[in-house]
Image (tube, helix red, strand yellow):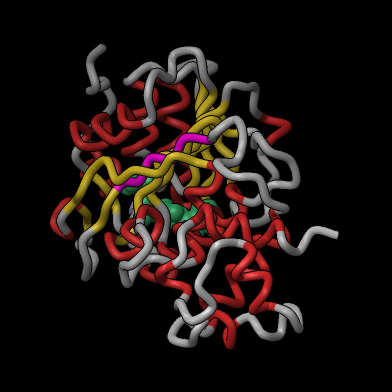
Amino acid sequence: MSAIDTLPPLRDVIETHGLSARKSLGQNFLLDLNLTAKIARQAGDLSEADVLEIGPGPGGLTRGLLAEGARRVLAIEKDARCMPALEEISAAYPGRLQVINGDALEINPLSHLTPPIHVAANLPYNVGTELLVRWLTPKEWPPYWQSLTLMFQREVAERIVAQPGSKAYGRLALLAQWRAEAKIVMSLPPGAFTPPPKVSSAVVHLTALAEPRFPADAATLSRIVAAAFNQRRKMLRAALKGQAPDIQDRLIAAGIDPTERAEQVSLEQFCALARQFKK
Ligand code: SAM
């Protein structure tokens, strides 16, 4: 299927609708439709799926998702200025694009979506990380989404896929990798965006696993990991001493050297430690 539609080029769309980029909304637009189609393809076969897109802006990625065959796209955009441009896309793809003008942090999109559901977004850094954490910590697992295809600053993308022993390894890696498969699938230089941001970006693709990789209670695991990495330079027996008076014994029972630092501890070991806290 062709990735390019018959709508005007994005530069013209921006000009026509006066969509000068606003820093306060983290607006760095992707204007190359070949590139947005390539990002859309990273989400997999969307022909039988609904896609939740957060922050469509002038619609570059939206057009990529639709041209690549997404069954339906629900796009949530905070900037009301983008609505007319998005309505034009909606008219070009009858019945396949629904746009909501609002804050993705406040809207529950579920009633507008039919499974299977995939998520795709090129979002400002702070909103993207906040939403990622929410998507990774739903009340029930498996979550409503099958995959997340998300643009991040390169440094954040590296934190999501990081392995033990690396500086980037921490809460985000453990949260992401416990119940999902996370991969960096594309790297983009600042010049791919208009205006160019200061740093490079990367697309991360996360696929929800049916079951967590290792059994653990989500809240306990999250609490222990947070405490361990809050004091990441301390030995674990010190960093976690507030968690239980016999933390040293619990660490040993979980197969963890109590003098180790959080950075050295694998996901499997953190899950084993969380299980030591079960009543
Ligand atoms: N997806 C477009 C693209 O790739 O060209 C725009 C990307 S731009 C980095 C981020 C978009 O997210 C902007 O259009 C911005 O207005 C929107 N945005 C920022 N915060 C948002 C929020 N809380 N909810 C929904 N959209 C938001």
13 vs 222, left or right, is: left
The residue furthest right is 279
- The stretch of residues the image draws in magenta is 203-208
Q: Position of residue 121 (x, y in %)?
A: 42, 44
Residue 102 in view, yes or no: no
Front residue (pair 104, 23):
104
Task: Name the residue located 60 percent from the left edge and 30 percent from the top edge.
Answer: 210
Task: Name the residue located 34 percent from the left edge and 43 percent from the top edge.
Answer: 183
Task: Name the residue located 48 percent from the left edge and 87 percent from the top edge.
Answer: 234
194 vs 55, left or right, is: left
Task: Name the residue located 75 percent from the left edge and 46 percent from the top edge.
Answer: 139
Front residue (pair 211, 194):
211
**Quarter occupied by the N terminus:** top left
Residue 195 in view, yes or no: yes
Q: Main secondary structure of the magenta part?
A: strand
Front residue (pair 198, 224):
224
Q: Quadrant of residue 219?
A: bottom right
**Quarter occupied by the C terminus:** bottom right
Q: Position of residue 70 (x, y in %)?
A: 43, 20
Q: Position of residue 172 (x, y in %)?
A: 48, 61
144 vs 175, left or right, is: right
Q: Position of residue 170 (x, y in %)?
A: 45, 67
118 w.r.t. 265: above or below = above
Front residue (pair 262, 44):
262
130 vs 233, left or right, is: right
Residue 204 within the segment the image draws in magenta: yes
How many tags in the picture?
A: 0
Q: Quadrant of residue 264?
A: bottom left
Residue 212 within the segment the image draws in magenta: no
